[in-house]
Image (spheres, rainbow, N blue to C red):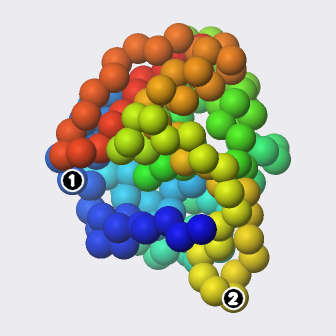
C-alpha cells in the first residue's frame, strides 16, 4: 500500500491548519510521532513546553538538529511523564500508529492527566477505515498502520473511553479534540 506524505508540509513550519491545533494545546504537550518536529518547534517558539517522541531515528535527529526536544521512543513503551500530560498530539495521520486506533488511543489515555486532551488529525475522507502495513522506504521494515476518517475515529474514541469535543476542518484537513 502506498500512502502519500506531503513532505514539504511535514518537514516545513506549521501552517494555518496546524495553528488551529496549537491554539487548543495546554502545555506541556507530548507530540506522538513527532517526525521532524514542526509542532514541537512551534510550541517552543510560543514559549510552551513540548516533547516529541518518534520511532524513527532520522525524525528524532531532525527534530533535535532543529532545536526541539525529542526522544527515540515507541509510544507503547515506557514514556516520560506517564499520566501527567495535559495535551497529546496525533497529527499527520498518526492515529494510524500501530495499526489499531483503539489500542493507540487507550495507550495515550494512560499518558494524559484525567483532565487531559488529545488532538487528532483524521484522514480527509470521513468514511476511511483501513489497516495495512507500510514502510518509509523500499528498503525499510514494514510496520502496521491504519488510516482513520472521522466516522471511524468517533467509534474508536468511544471504545477507548474518550468523549469527542471540538471537530473542525481547515484546508481539507480534519481534526478532533478528544477528552478522557
Q: Is residue 142 above or below residue 92?
A: below
Q: Is residue 2 visible?
A: yes
Q: Which quadrant is the C terminus positioned in?
A: top right
The part of the image, by quadrant, that contains residue 7 is: bottom left
Judge from the rendering whether residue 32 lies leftward or rightward of residue 126; answer left or right.
right
Q: Is residue 52 visible?
A: no
Q: Which quadrant is the N terminus positioned in?
A: bottom right
Provide the secondary structure element on which disc 1 rests: loop
Judge from the rendering whether residue 135 lies leftward or rightward of residue 174; answer left or right.
right
Give residue 92's position: percent from left, percent from top: 44, 52
Judge from the rendering whether residue 112 lies leftward or rightward of residue 168; answer left or right.
right
| Residue at screen point 68% across, 17% down | 159
| Residue at screen point 31% across, 52% down | 42
Q: Which residue is mark 1?
A: 15
Mark 1 or mark 2, earlier in chain? 1
Q: Is residue 39 above or below residue 72?
A: above
| Residue at screen point 61% across, 15% down | 158
> Tag on residue 73?
none
Give residue 16's position: percent from left, percent from top: 17, 47
| Residue at screen point 34% across, 18% down | 166
> Tag on residue 139?
2
Provide the secondary structure element on which disc 2 rests: loop
The crowd level at tag 1 (other Cα within 10 Å; few <14, some 14-19, many 20+) is: few
Amino acid at each position: 500500500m502506498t500512502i502519500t506524505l506531503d513532505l514539504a508540509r511535514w518537514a516545513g513550519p506549521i501552517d494555518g491548519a496546524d495553528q488551529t491545533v496549537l491554539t487548543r494545546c495546554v502545555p506541556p504537550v507530548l507530540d506522538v510521532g513527532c517526525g521532524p518536529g514542526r509542532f514541537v518547534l512551534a510550541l517552543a517558539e510560543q514559549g510552551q513546553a513540548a516533547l516529541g517522541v518518534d520511532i524513527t531515528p532520522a525524525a528524532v535527529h531532525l527534530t533535535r538538529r532543529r532545536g526541539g526536544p525529542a526522544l527515540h521512543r515507541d509510544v507503547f513503551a515506557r514514556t516520560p511523564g506517564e499520566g501527567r500530560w495535559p495535551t497529546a498530539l496525533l497529527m499527520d495521520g498518526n492515529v494510524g500508529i500501530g495499526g489499531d486506533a483503539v489500542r493507540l488511543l487507550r495507550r495515550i489515555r494512560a499518558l494524559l492527566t484525567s483532565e487531559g486532551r488529545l488532538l487528532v488529525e483524521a484522514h480527509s475522507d470521513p468514511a476511511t477505515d483501513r489497516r495495512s502495513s507500510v514502510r518509509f522506504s523500499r528498503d525499510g521494515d514494514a510496520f502496521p498502520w491504519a488510516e482513520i476518517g472521522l466516522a471511524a475515529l468517533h467509534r474508536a474514541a468511544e471504545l477507548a473511553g474518550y468523549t469527542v469535543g471540538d471537530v473542525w476542518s481547515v484546508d481539507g484537513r480534519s481534526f478532533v479534540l478528544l477528552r478522557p
